Image (tube, coloured by chain):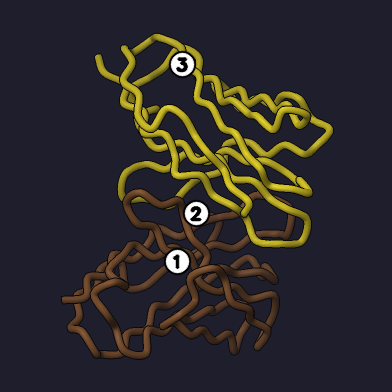
Amino acid sequence: DAGITQSPRHKVTETGTPVTLRCHQTENHRYMYWYRQDPGHGLRLIHYSYGVKDTDKGEVSDGYSVSRSKTEDFLLTLESATSSQTSVYFCATGPIGEKLFFGSGTQLSVL
Amino acid sequence: KNQVEQSPQSLIILEGKNCTLQCNYTVSPFSNLRWYKQDTGRGPVSLTIMTFSENTKSNGRYTATLDADTKQSSLHITASQLSDSASYICVVSERDTPLVFGKGTRLSVIA
């Protein structure tokens, strides 16, 4: 897994509550990414970061925010969770133009 | 819109047999093409990455080919094993922009 960990692995929450997912890497990669994976869709980019405090939106960023205060940590926040945000979330990192390393994923269920 | 289409959606083969998975893309300008393997409940793991100038790349029993003119790639698995059962995802990169993921091919290898 090239030193990338996600927490929690599983989360069940209620509609309208805030949720924060954490991604931690030990390889000092500049780029970090948050994806969601749903049946019938390929992995879709939510947000990514190209350095400390440098982030940008992906194709499905509505309802999500991110923060990167340290190189090794990239946080994904659902300000007010909705049922449509039930998904598996993957964090990834790696050198630009080279292979990405993915975390093991977070299964989030919003009831 | 840049797209990556994979076929077949799913495939069942007998252990020891070979198989080929297909990937067609419309991403342009093209930077590189990657194949990932994703076991159930895990994050994707990189198998191969090919640039525009590479026609083939191998990783053990996995061989990827690329035809940049027709925008097609294939992943050939030789002498399949039960552990090859997974989803195989084709991913295409534009220059300096986030990756475009296919929906994957679900491969089941049975004894």
Dot 1 and dot 2 residues touching (CB under 8 Å): yes
Query: In what element is the residue under mark 2?
Result: loop
Q: Quadrant of the N terminus of chain B?
A: bottom right
- Which chain did the renderer colour yellow? B
Q: Chain of mark 2?
A: A
Amino acid type at mark 2:
Asp
Residue projecting furthest to the front: B1
Q: Alpha-carbon neighbours of circle 2 within 10 Å: few (<14), some, or many (≥20)?
A: few
Q: Which residue is mark 2?
A: A1
Q: Which residue is mark 3?
A: B19
Compared with A11, B51 (above or below) is above
Amino acid type at mark 3:
Cys
Query: What is the C-alpha distance between the residues marked 3 and 2?
Result: 27 Å
Q: Which residue is mark 1?
A: A5
Amino acid type at mark 1:
Thr
Specify the colour of chain A.
Answer: brown
Compared with A35, B60 (above or below) is above
Q: Alpha-carbon neighbours of circle 3 within 10 Å: few (<14), some, or many (≥20)?
A: some
Q: Chain of mark 3?
A: B
Image location of residue A37, percent across then percent down: 39, 58
